[in-house]
């Protein structure tokens, strides 16, 4: 079952578990709507309250990607170091160090355009923050290298290299 406004999954993609989870999600959403009289708007508001999105533009500044995401999540989302570490699959101490370095480089709050965002689930502990961001923007959002480069403040050729390296890491982990 696909929810209104959600992209359809291409046929043949996903495994049995993914199909099971999508069916389960569809059953839960149907039950909330019929038995508890949730409207589509209420259902999506509830769903989105639990999703934290990171503006891609935070990676375009002078901070490293790890520093930028630590600063954004700490200051803009008011998450603790432990929460950030848990959600990103990183060590608490590295999040603390990244945040401290970010504070020294940029003591003012991060201001970021939120037109292109990435969910926290896009960040993998098996890849760097930048690799995860590029992989998500390229494969999920289907942006071109030039657009990703513009958003992240990088060179398009570097985006190609980062994407290739990130995809290679995924193939190595699948084997």
Image (cartoon, helix red, strand yellow):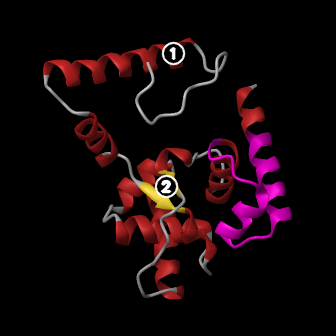
- Which residue is drawn at the image coordinates 53% and 33% (left, top)? 7
Q: Nearer the viewer, residue 99 or 36?
A: 36
Magenta-drawn stretch contains 161: yes
Q: Is residue 160 above or below residue 33?
A: below
SS under mark 2: loop
The residue tagged 1 is 19
Q: Is residue 148 above or below residue 64?
A: above
Using the rendered view, name the quadrant where residue 57 is placed. bottom right
Q: Residues within 10 Å of mark 2 (few under 14, many from 20)?
A: some
Q: Residues within 10 Å of mark 1 (few under 14, many from 20)?
A: few
Task: Specify whether 173 is left or right of 21.
Answer: right
Instruction: Residue at the far left: name it.
Output: 36
Q: Which mark is residue 91?
A: 2
SS under mark 1: helix
Question: Which residues lie in the magenta part?
Answer: 140-169
Q: Is residue 137 above or below residue 170?
A: below
> Whole-percent x and y of residue 51?
37, 47
- Which residue is drawn at the image coordinates 22% and 24% (left, top)? 33
């Amino acid at each position: 079952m696909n929810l209104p406004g959600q992209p359809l999954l291409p046929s043949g993609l996903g495994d049995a578990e993914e199909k099971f989870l999508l069916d389960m999600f569809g059953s839960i959403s149907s039950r909330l709507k019929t038995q508890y009289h949730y409207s589509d708007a209420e259902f999506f508001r509830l769903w989105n309250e639990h999703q934290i999105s990171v503006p891609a533009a935070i990676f375009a500044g002078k901070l490293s990607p790890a520093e930028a995401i630590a600063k954004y999540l700490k200051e803009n989302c008011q998450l603790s170091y432990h929460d950030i570490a848990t959600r990103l699959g990183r060590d608490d101490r590295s999040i603390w160090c990244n945040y401290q370095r970010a504070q020294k480089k940029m003591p003012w709050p991060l201001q970021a355009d939120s037109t292109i965002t990435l969910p926290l689930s896009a960040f993998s502990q098996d890849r760097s923050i930048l690799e995860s961001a590029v992989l998500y923007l390229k494969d999920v959002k289907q942006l071109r290298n030039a657009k990703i480069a513009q958003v992240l403040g990088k060179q398009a050729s570097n985006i190609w290299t980062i994407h290739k390296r990130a995809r290679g890491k995924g193939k190595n982990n699948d084997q």
